[in-house]
């Protein structure tokens, strides 16, 4: 049995996220799930169902420059043949950038060490019509110094329960954020977050909290108390998914 790794890029605008629903009835948009679309093409290629494992679940509307996935197969096809086949039949908003044959023990999710997200915020007086699908527009110019102060307070290993929308989460909510960078110019603010793991909506809540600090809706000095409280109501908003990109997965 051979094991192949895929490097995938996608525009998540019309999809329900990476992971397919447990039952078809739970799929709410016409796009379905990205995992599902790729599995359908792999099944067509193989003539039987193929299970694809993604590195990280991205939620509805979130994009990826680099999602990593793997699948096992008995196929004798070469990596470039699999890549060509997938890109021939996949929708144009999903692309397979690389196909690599890897060690049988490689697992896209379990072996991942770090995930990096980038969020784009337009702050210009007039938002570009070409950025509207991929940038969040902020009507008020945020205080970048406050955003950086909030970002610094979130670094390190903490219990990020306050940054979860899932009140019934049974898994540990302790995560390690290794870096948060806030860049800005006259027209755009970019927030980049790197952590050992993210659960659904966590990146959006983290960035929403940082943005709310920049808009003086939350004070950066309150971040340690928010972390300690574990109270979702004290953290900031979850920013819109359209500005969020999974940019890298490190192993």
Image (cartoon, grey):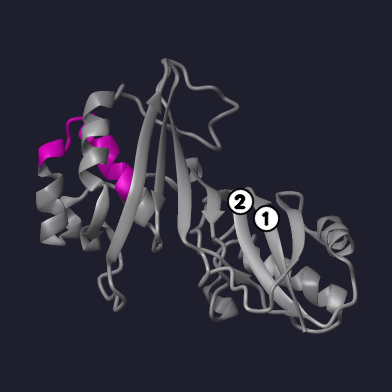
Of residues 157 and 61, which is closer to you in this image? 157
Q: Quadrant of residue 200?
A: bottom left
| Left-right relation of 124 to 39 | left
Residue 46 place in picture, x, y as percent: 85, 78
Task: Indicate whether residue 80 is drawn in magenta.
Answer: no
Q: Main secondary structure of the magenta part?
A: helix
| Residue 83 visible, this angle | yes
Can you say which quadrant of the picture contains the C terminus?
bottom right
Q: Secondary structure at mark 1?
A: strand
| Left-right relation of 43 to 112 | right
Mark 1, residue position:
8
Q: Residue at coordinates 83% horizontally, 83% vertically from top-left?
A: 74
Q: Which mark is first along the chain, 1 or 2?
A: 1
Q: Residue at coordinates 68% horizontally, 56% vertically from top-left?
A: 7
Range covered by the magenta-colored residues: 206-221
What is the count of numbered marks? Answer: 2
Image vertical order of residue 171 relative to residue 78, above or below: below
Image vertical order of residue 228 relative to residue 244, above or below: below
Mark 2, residue position:
66
Residue 36 place in picture, x, y as percent: 66, 70
Residue 172 place in picture, x, y as percent: 28, 73
């Amino acid at each position: 049995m051979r094991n192949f790794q895929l490097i995938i890029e996608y525009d998540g605008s019309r999809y329900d996220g990476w992971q397919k629903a447990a039952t078809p009835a739970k799929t709410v948009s016409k796009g379905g799930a990205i995992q599902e679309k790729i599995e359908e093409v792999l099944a067509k290629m193989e003539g039987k169902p193929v299970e694809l494992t993604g590195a990280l679940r991205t939620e509805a509307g979130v994009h990826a420059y680099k999602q990593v996935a793997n699948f096992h197969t008995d196929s004798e096809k070469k990596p470039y043949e699999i890549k060509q086949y997938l890109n021939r039949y996949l929708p144009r908003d999903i692309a397979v950038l690389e196909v690599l044959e890897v060690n049988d023990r490689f697992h896209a999710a379990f072996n991942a060490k770090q995930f990096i997200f980038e969020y784009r915020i337009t702050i210009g007086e007039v938002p570009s019509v070409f950025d509207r699908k991929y940038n969040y527009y902020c009507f008020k110019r945020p205080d970048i110094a406050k955003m950086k102060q909030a970002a610094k307070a979130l670094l390190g290993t903490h219990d990020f329960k306050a940054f979860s929308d899932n009140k019934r989460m049974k898994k540990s909510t302790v995560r390690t954020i290794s870096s948060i960078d806030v860049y800005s110019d006259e027209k755009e603010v970019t927030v980049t977050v790197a952590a050992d793991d993210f659960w659904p909506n966590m990146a959006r809540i983290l960035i929403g909290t940082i943005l709310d600090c920049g808009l003086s809706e939350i004070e950066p000095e309150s971040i340690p108390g928010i972390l300690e409280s574990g109270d979702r109501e004290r953290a900031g908003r979850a920013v819109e998914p359209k500005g969020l990109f999974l940019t890298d997965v490190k192993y």
